[in-house]
Amino acid sequence: DYVTYKYEKELSYLEENWNSNTQKMSEDEFKETLFSMIDSTKGLTITKALSDFTNFYFVIVPELQEWIDINFAQKAIANGLQKRANVMSPELFAQISVEQTLEEKQHASSSFKNRFFDNMEEAKKWLFDE
């Protein structure tokens, strides 16, 4: 397994925590992991999400960034995601690839907010500060 999820219904909140096994993850395994997340969250109300990339070591190549936007990010926003906080990995290349993926497309939805943090506390404060 590469990621664990925690869902809090009363907060409409999903937290994903990527682990160091991502060092050995293939592109297909990454896609399968995202599809599994989509399947397991169908029907859930998620307006806030936190992605902990501090132990994320898989490098997302540009072609995969486009795939993520089409197959994952746009669907999450269309399904109600309003805010996403990202706690970044210290590993330079993985961090750059994650940031590029999430920043590359500025979604048409002006209600969607996406920010990067270097610690969980600040990320959660921003997510739940309304």
Image: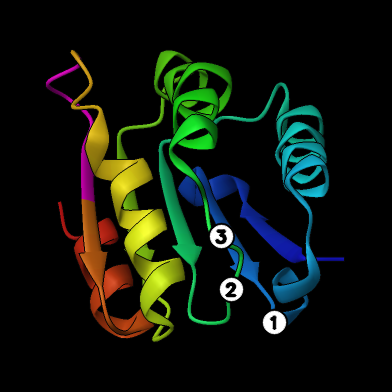
Q: Secondary structure at mark 1?
A: helix
- Residue 116 position, x and y percent, is 24, 63
Label 3 or label 2, whichever lies nearer to me, is 2
Rounded to the nearest angstrom, the CA distance separating label 3 from label 1 is 17 Å
Residue 1 numbered tag: none
Residue ID at (23%, 30%):
112
> Which residue is depicted at the point 79% across and 54% down?
26
* Among the two numbered marks 1 and 2 on one chain, the one whose residue lies closer to the N terminus: 1
Q: Is residue 45 left or right of residue 77?
A: right
Which mark is nearer the camera, 3 or 1? 1
Between residue 62 and residue 103, name the one nearer to us: 62
Whether the magenta-drawn stretch holds residue 10 is answered as no
Q: For this view, does 11 lie left or right of residue 29?
A: left
- Report helix, strand or loop for mark 2: loop
* Furthest residue in direction right, as rendered: 1
List x then y, in percent, for residue 78: 43, 13
Q: Any mark on residue 57, and which?
A: 2
For marks 3 and 1 on the same chain, the one whose residue lies earlier in the sequence: 3
Relative height, residue 36 to residue 42 (above, below): below
Residue at the disc numbered 3:
15
- Percent x, y of residue 95: 38, 69
Amino acid type at image mark 3: Glu
Contact, mark 1 vs mark 2 (Cβ under 8 Å)? yes
Q: Is residue 8 above or below residue 121?
A: above
Placement of 123 over or under 127, stated as above or below: below
Label 3 and label 2: CA atoms lie apart by 18 Å
Quadrant of the image containing the N terminus: bottom right
Q: Earlier in the sequence, mark 3 or mark 2?
A: 3
Residue named by callout 1: 20
Q: Secondary structure at mark 3?
A: strand
